[in-house]
Amino acid sequence: MSKILDATCDADGKVTADEALVPEATVLSEGKQASSGILLIDEDRARYFPSSATDIKTTIEKSITALTDLSAALTEIATALTAIGAGMTGPTTAPPPTLPTSVLTITSKVTAIAQTKSELEQLKGALK
Amino acid sequence: MKIRCLHGYFIFEETKSGEISSFVSTTGLELVARDHYYTFAKLAAAPDYSIKGKDLLGIPATKTFAGKPWEVFAANGFVYDFSLDVVRPLELTVLKTTVKQAGKRFVSPGLIVPGSITVDGRVQDFSAWFSMERLTWLYSEVGYV
């Protein structure tokens, strides 16, 4: 017969449940930051399980920020290359090179990143 | 009335319907219902887990443990003394009693307080019944530590 209690764990790995310290509890996580979760006591074995929802939410938020920065940087690069191409001139016998098609690829990647970002936003909102 | 003392935790079960009221009025023991059995009022609140250092029916638990109330008692080494209405470590019981064999059963002057000292050791568990006709406590099994 086992018992499940609401519990917390501090950054030192000390588990508290039912307003009491449970020093013998095994922390089943990295346990390097404070967390809330559950304490499972099964006979004389006590194990602490942190809720991973907070960690996942933070990871998603950081990913969204990184994608936003990456998208902005790629847009600036594509814009700069387009401007450079537009400014290039030359005689009919030696025309300027056409803008590389890779600039269009950069633009399409920005669109793909925006789609991924949107999906991550939805995932964050759907965290249980 | 069938009586079991499991690691110092008491379970009373009727063998005939309505037996509990006459048992209570005859013995003076106050019992309350818990799950499918009766027990002492203090034991009705016995939790199914303990956390070392946290209060367990009046004294700090010695073990972090989850199980049936009597398993929690066993893990912590506690027994219930109904004569004083306290839970305490088994080895702190200072009462003495006698348990004598009488044919296939055992007799004792009254309901044994768990942890009581006998010539065979301290009583930890027993199965018993109370004879309403003869007003005697009869024991079918007695376990010692």
Image (spheres, coloured by chain):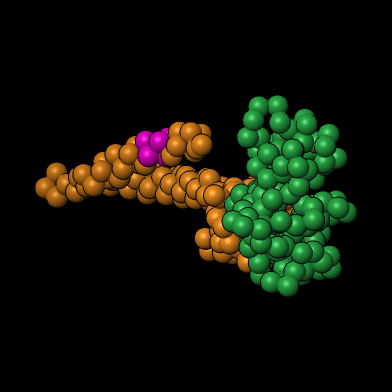
Chain colours: A orange, B green
The span shown in magenta is: A115-119
Image point 63% across, 63% down: which residue?
B143
Residue A118 in the magenta stretch? The answer is yes
In screen coordinates, is A66 left or right of B58?
A: left
Q: Position of residue A109 (x, y in %)?
A: 31, 43
In screen coordinates, is A97 left or right of A25?
A: left
- What is the quadrant of residue A105 in the picture? top left
Q: Nearer the viewer, residue B26 or A86?
A: B26
Q: Position of residue A40 (x, y in %)?
A: 57, 53
Magenta span dominant secondary structure: helix
Image point 37% across, 36% down: which residue?
A115
Q: Nearer the viewer, residue B30 or A51?
A: B30
Residue A3 in the magenta stretch? The answer is no
- What is the quadrant of residue B64 in the picture? bottom right
* Residue at the left extreme, as displayed: A93
In screen coordinates, is A4 left or right of A81?
A: right
- What is the quadrant of residue A79 in the picture? top left
Image point 66% across, 70% down: which residue?
B145
Q: Is residue B44 visible?
A: no
Q: Position of residue A58 (x, y in %)?
A: 54, 49
* Residue at the front extreme, as displayed: B103
Q: Nearer the viewer, residue B107 or A95?
A: B107
Q: Up-down: is B84 above or below A103? A: below
Q: Is residue B25 visible?
A: yes
